[in-house]
């Protein structure tokens, strides 16, 4: 059986929303290895930001003539674009899932 524990968002970042009876060592080991969802999200958004900063720097160097590497600049711009699009799609899926849960009747 699973007990559902409703609490305000942000009040219990470390504990799961659904608590099951009995320990789940494989889940605890995976969480210890990968961190929490919040930590993963923060790391991923930091990586997107880093890629965008790198692309901006490369394009500035190309514009000012400090660099002649147009291929490297285009690659870094494309990496930043793809990372941003992926982050937006993940956000859209999370919002859609939240709205679906909101519509559910208990």
Image (tube, helix red, strand yellow):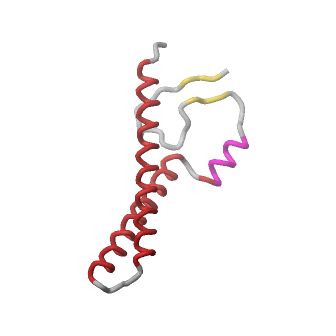
From the viewer's side, name the closer residue of 24 and 73: 73
* Magenta stretch prevailing secondary structure: helix
Q: Which quarter of the image is occupied by the N terminus?
A: top right
Number of numbered discs: 0
From the viewer's side, name the closer residue of 13 and 94: 94
- Relative to residue 45, is residue 12 depicted above or below? above
Task: Residue 41: give x, y in percent of width and height.
Answer: 47, 50
Task: Residue 38: give x, y in percent of width and height.
Answer: 48, 48
Give the residue furthest to the left: 64
Q: What segment is highlighted magenta in the picture?
A: 25-33
- Relative to residue 99, is residue 90 depicted above or below? below
- Relative to residue 94, is residue 41 depicted above or below? below
Task: Residue 5: give x, y in percent of width and height.
Answer: 52, 26
The structure residue drawn at horizontal position 41% and vertical position 26%, both measured from the top left corner, is 99
From the viewer's side, name the closer residue of 87 and 19: 87
- Residue 65: name its quadrant: bottom left
Q: Is residue 94 shown in magenta? A: no
The structure residue drawn at horizontal position 46% and vertical position 24%, both measured from the top left corner, is 101
- Residue 18: name its quadrant: top right
Q: Is residue 3 left or right of residue 21?
A: left
């Amino acid at each position: 059986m699973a007990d559902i524990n409703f609490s305000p968002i942000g009040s219990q970042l470390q504990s799961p929303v659904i608590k099951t009876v009995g320990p789940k060592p494989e889940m605890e080991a995976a969480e210890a290895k990968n961190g929490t969802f919040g930590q993963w999200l923060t790391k991923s958004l930091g990586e997107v930001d880093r890629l965008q900063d790198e692309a901006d720097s490369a394009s500035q160097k190309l514009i000012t003539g400090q660099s002649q590497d147009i291929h490297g600049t285009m690659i870094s711009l494309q990496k930043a674009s793809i990372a941003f699009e992926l982050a937006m799609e993940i956000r859209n899926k999370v919002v859609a899932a939240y709205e679906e849960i909101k519509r559910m009747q208990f």
